[in-house]
Image (cartoon, helix red, strand yellow):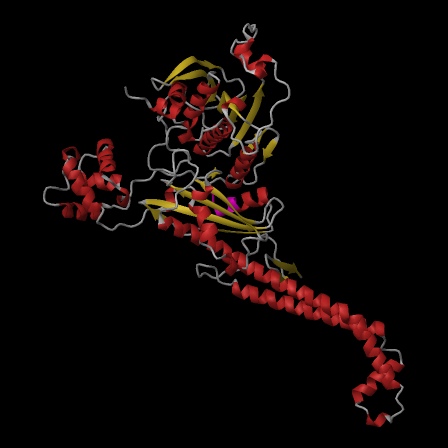
């Protein structure tokens, strides 16, 4: 008997990140939050997500199931703890994995301000595994049609209670109220309620409420970290949960990703067959230009000529059988094409990444970079990176924060390309950083139409592709180069401060010694005619009390201050010369904002390492 997709994932729930009660609670929160972010970004509104986690006591849970009030007859059948015969609880060994017997129950409610869901589509969206709306060549947070369905499967397995959904597609549209379960054997929704109610509050968005088994105490750290990491990569979103509020820091939301054509280098026989079956085009020439990326009409004609005499420009694609598909794909994979464009992707952006890291981690130094678009297996990939130093929340050594299509990844980091690259492929000493003693934060955000995940649970990105390894390494190195120059300036300034401090420390002793020497010379009875004129002049000043120990100290301190300012000015000039050209070879010029209707004259510019001040006359 053939199993349905729902049965398979119910029996192998670890594939989707539901291997334990604690991990299942974490994954449920993650899946629902990411759905909420997608829903808001789909209509271009700044996301506002509220997460409520409410623990349900065993007595309340049993009451919800109608199981309270039954009297125990044969106490020998019960566990000691439930029969009331147990005394003090046994202490669990350190590091013991949370099991089903440690499970408690939680009501998880996630509310957003997104696009909402169509009334008639809600049951299938939540109650049919692998029926996702995110299939296709496009950058998406989810791909497998599992997320919310696995939450419902876990709810059915752990509590047996249905999921409740409220959703509205607009402030003037009615609110859909749905209560549903999932028939695992049929892989179909089991609808208990499917109604509409008037939208008197002008609300748009969705609210999902589900009661599931979980273990909060040991996974609270992961949940908090996930929300903090999400605030790093989406600082334009606002989330609130169990007294933790991540305020919105940026109003700049990345543009939504565009649907991309399939790049020819990513084709295989099955993909070509699917494209032919789904295409609206009728003839081969238009099919190639409409369905494949980087293929225009002239190139398509050259390709068809190369396919062989049995192919023509006006050949109906319905006549292309499996043998012809093999010939087409074999030829196409031998051709050379322009790389796919990264314009279809929606990375977080250096601005948002910088703001997110500064807001959540508060480092001492930070640098960001975005290298050129990379091609991995025919799909465009953008790797954004940030490297930070210091910070109150940071720990010594290298800490890697990983994101895929703006999703934080917290588990199985040892297999991830970002972790392996940061730990083994970067020579940190060459950038004036010690990977053991310095507090180094590495943030890698990878965006693509096809992320090479290590499994359906989306916990890590594989390390097998050399192009991806190279892109991650280049992104980190660009950040490190920026930090290296800042660290060099910091070290030079530190040395200058130490030099100034040492000089100032000896000023009293030097002044005292000079005055003592001058007093000894002035008491010499030798004829003044044999002395140098400058020496005689100083002795006269000493005699007139124009030179004293206090005056010498003041003069020496003034000299040290002037010398120090001269060194600082020289460094600033050198720094500006170094920074005159940006990385792309263009001249960088200072720009000023002023009112058009006010004629102003400026006296001079004062330059600092970060800005230029222009003074009015």
Q: Is residue 44 left or right of residue 289?
A: right
The percent position of residue 458, horizontal first and vertical second, equals 42, 36
Q: Is residue 87 left or right of residue 97?
A: right
Judge by depth and name the residue closer to the eye, 343 or 474.
474
Is the C terminus in the top left, top right, bottom left or bottom right quadrant?
bottom right
Residue at the image point whose x is 46% and y is 42% from the top: 413
Magenta residues, start to end: 348-353
Q: Is residue 347 visible?
A: no
Reply above or below: 27 against 426: above
Residue at the image point whose x is 37% and y is 38% from the top: 258
Is the N terminus in the top left, top right, bottom left or bottom right quadrant?
top left
Q: Is residue 547 left or right of residue 47?
A: right
Residue at the image point whose x is 63% and y is 67% from the top: 569
Reply above or below: 171 against 253: above
Question: Which quarter of the picture shows residue 284?
Answer: top left
Judge by depth and name the residue closer to the eye, 134 or 217.
217
Magenta stretch, overall SS: helix
The percent position of residue 507, horizontal first and vertical second, equals 78, 71
Check if residue 349 falls in the magenta segment: yes
Check if residue 401 falls in the magenta segment: no
Residue at the image point whose x is 41% and y is 33% from the top: 457
């Amino acid at each position: 008997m053939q199993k349905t997709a729902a049965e398979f994932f119910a029996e192998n729930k670890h594939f989707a990140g539901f291997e334990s009660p604690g991990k299942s609670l974490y994954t449920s929160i993650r899946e629902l939050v990411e759905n909420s972010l997608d829903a808001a970004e789909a209509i271009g509104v700044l996301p506002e997500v509220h997460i409520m986690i409410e623990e349900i006591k065993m007595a309340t849970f049993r009451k919800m199931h109608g199981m309270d009030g039954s009297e125990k007859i044969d106490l020998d059948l019960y566990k000691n703890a439930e029969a009331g015969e147990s005394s003090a609880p046994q202490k669990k060994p350190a590091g013991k994995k949370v099991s089903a017997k440690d499970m408690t129950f939680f009501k998880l409610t996630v509310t957003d301000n997104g696009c909402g869901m169509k009334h008639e589509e809600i049951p299938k969206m939540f109650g049919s595994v692998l029926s996702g709306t995110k299939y296709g060549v496009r950058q998406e947070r989810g791909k497998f049609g599992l997320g919310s369905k696995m939450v419902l499967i876990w709810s059915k397995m752990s509590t047996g209670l249905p999921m409740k959904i409220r959703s509205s597609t607009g402030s003037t549209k009615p609110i859909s109220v749905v209560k549903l379960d999932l028939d695992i054997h049929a892989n179909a929704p089991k609808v208990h309620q499917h109604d509409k109610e008037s939208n008197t509050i002008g609300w748009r968005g969705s609210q999902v409420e589900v009661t599931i088994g979980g273990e909060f105490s040991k996974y609270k750290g992961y949940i908090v970290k996930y929300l903090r990491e999400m605030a790093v990569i989406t600082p334009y979103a606002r989330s609130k949960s169990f007294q933790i509020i991540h305020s919105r820091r940026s109003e700049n939301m990345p543009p939504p990703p565009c649907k991309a054509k399939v790049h020819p280098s990513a084709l295989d026989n099955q993909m070509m067959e699917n494209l032919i079956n789904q295409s609206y085009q009728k003839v081969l020439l238009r099919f190639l230009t409409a369905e494949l990326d980087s293929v225009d009409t002239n190139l398509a004609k050259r390709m068809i000529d190369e396919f062989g005499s049995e192919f023509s420009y006006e050949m109906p694609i319905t006549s292309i059988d499996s043998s012809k598909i093999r010939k087409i794909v074999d030829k196409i994979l031998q051709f050379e094409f322009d790389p796919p464009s990264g314009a279809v992707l929606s990375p977080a952006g250096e601005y948002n990444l910088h703001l997110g890291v500064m807001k959540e981690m508060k480092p001492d130094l930070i640098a960001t970079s975005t290298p050129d678009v990379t091609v991995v297996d025919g799909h465009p990939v953008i790797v954004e990176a940030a490297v930070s130093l210091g910070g109150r929340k940071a720990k010594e050594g290298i800490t890697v924060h990983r994101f895929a299509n703006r999703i934080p990844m917290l588990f199985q980091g040892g297999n991830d390309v970002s972790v392996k690259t940061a730990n083994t492929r970067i020579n940190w000493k060459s950038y004036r950083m010690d990977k053991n003693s310095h507090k180094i934060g590495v943030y890698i955000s990878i965006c693509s139409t096809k992320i090479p995940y290590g499994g359906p649970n989306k916990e890590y990105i594989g390390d097998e592709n050399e192009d991806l390894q190279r892109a991650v390494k280049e992104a980190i190195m660009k950040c490190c180069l920026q930090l290296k120059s800042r660290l060099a300036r910091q070290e030079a300034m530190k040395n200058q401060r130490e030099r100034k401090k040492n000089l100032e420390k000896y000023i009293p002793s030097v002044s005292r010694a000079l005055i003592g020497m001058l007093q000894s010379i002035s008491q010499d009875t030798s004829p003044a005619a044999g002395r140098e004129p400058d020496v005689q002049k100083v002795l006269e000043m000493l005699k007139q009390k124009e030179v004293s120990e206090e005056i010498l100290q003041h003069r020496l301190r003034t000299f040290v201050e002037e010398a120090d300012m001269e060194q600082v000015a020289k460094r600033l000039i050198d720094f500006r010369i170094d920074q005159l050209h940006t990385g792309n070879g263009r001249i960088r010029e200072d720009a000023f904002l002023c009112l058009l209707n006010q004629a102003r004259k400026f006296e001079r510019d004062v330059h600092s390492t970060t800005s230029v001040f222009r003074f009015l006359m």
